[in-house]
Amino acid sequence: MRKNVHRAFWAADRVQQAPSGFVDWLGGAAPPRLAVKDMIAVEGLIHSAGLPAFADRRAPKDAAAVARFRAAGYSVAGTTVTDSAGFGTITPGLENPKHPQRAVGGSSGGAAVAVALGLAEVGLGTDTGGSIRIPAAYCDLFGFKATNGRTAMGGVVGLSPTFDTLGVLADDIATLQEAAAVLVTNWAGQSAAPLSFAIDGAALAACDPHVVAQFETITSRLGISRVVREYEPYRSLAEAHSLIVCAEALATHGAEWRQRPAGFPPLVRRALAFGQRIGTTELTAAHAEVGAAQQAAREREPLILVAPSLPMPPAKSGAGLVAIGRHVHPITNANIRLTFKANVTGQPAVVAPIGGLSVQFVGPVNADEGLLAGVQALLATSS
């Protein structure tokens, strides 16, 4: 106990000196350094999940995933800024180190900034609808979301257990793969059979024409020509995702929210209030919709599906609405348009900056190893 208290006071002394992206900054960490999203516990450091209600809460011990990284030789650089409770896709108050006019994406935006600034080799964050992949796309980073259920979630403030998983950010694919091998439980190394690539036609149809043109140039250079077009019930899946996230967030934060509503920002209060209005019938139907999507993913031909990470060019800082073709959309809806489905189906996903565009690769469930190996080989042969 004395050790924990000492570390907590020491971290509190250093927090005023924290660089951009960090909530608590330890400084002096030796590479490889790990920047940990403030929804994931690090012993003695702030563990607020970005909520004012928990601004002074410090973690009594490391989250299970953080312990895995320490055991693998990583040192913790600090904890990083997140959108409140993991809601939102644009972490506020941060400048994009690589593109100052852009937003940084979210909700793992602070971890992305830490990696982009070179203050950590790896960012560790949560991903419930794209929270690793969206900031990776905005900050020209590599990002990986594990198959749901293949990461240790102990010590993580959840948003929606149905969809929550962990992921990592890095500035190169080799570092990303090394971190993924630490993060994912029962990592099996190289896949026995290489996976083929195909373009996700349904995802591409939802993109802005400028993004489509850029993407087609990239896939032509990569030698990916096969297109898979499958029916995608986007609206019903998006509604099911939203219903379940809000209902499960209420289960996590409802008691504290009712006691101290001022400790929850307006966006979170609205989401929790919505969760309170969801009926049993609605929630049952939403879970059935998700179950059907998961079953379809398991029965699908084992491919790596390729699409842009975002349906539009990354939004400018402060943007509330963005255009996709001739239509205008709320920024959060646009940001998660191509990322949330992998959370619904539970599939692993990698995003990579290629030719000025962030490209997403989605693999079969539990094929995390094959997905990363395939993307790394593809990029190596095309460089």
Image: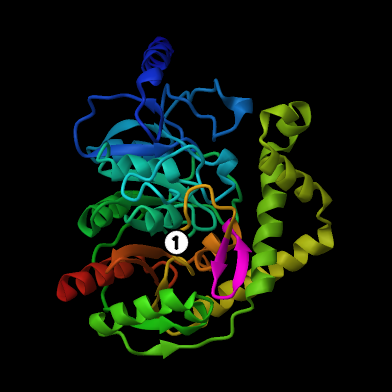
Q: Residue 287: x percent and y percent? A: 69, 65
Give the residue type that dot 1 points to. Thr
Q: Is residue 117 left or right of residue 307?
A: left
Quarter of the image holding residue 290?
A: bottom right
Principal secondary structure, stretch drawn in magenta: strand
Residue under label 1, please give it. Answer: 147
Q: Is residue 162 above or below residue 13?
A: below
Q: Quadrant of the C terminus?
A: bottom left
Residue at the spot x=51%, y=68% of the render? 338
> Residue 369, image x and y in percent?
31, 65
Which residues, given as a range, are shown in magenta?
322-331
Question: Is 48 covered by the magenta stretch?
Answer: no
Helix, strand or loop status at disc 1: loop
| Residue at 82%, 58% in the rendered image | 280
Q: Is residue 295 left or right of residue 214?
A: right
Q: Going 30% across and 31% down the picture, which residue do you hit?
A: 77
Q: Is residue 330 magenta?
A: yes
What colouring style does the render use? Answer: rainbow
Q: In terms of depth relative to the viewer, which is nearer, 181 or 15?
A: 15
Does residue 123 appear left or right of residue 376 in this picture? right
What quarter of the picture does the N terminus occupy?
A: top left
Q: Is residue 59 above or below residue 298?
A: above
Q: Residue 22 location in percent, x, y? A: 39, 32
175 is higher (above) or lower (below) than 59: below
CA neighbours of label 1 inside 10 A, class few (<14), some (14 to 19), many (20+): many
Q: How many marks?
A: 1
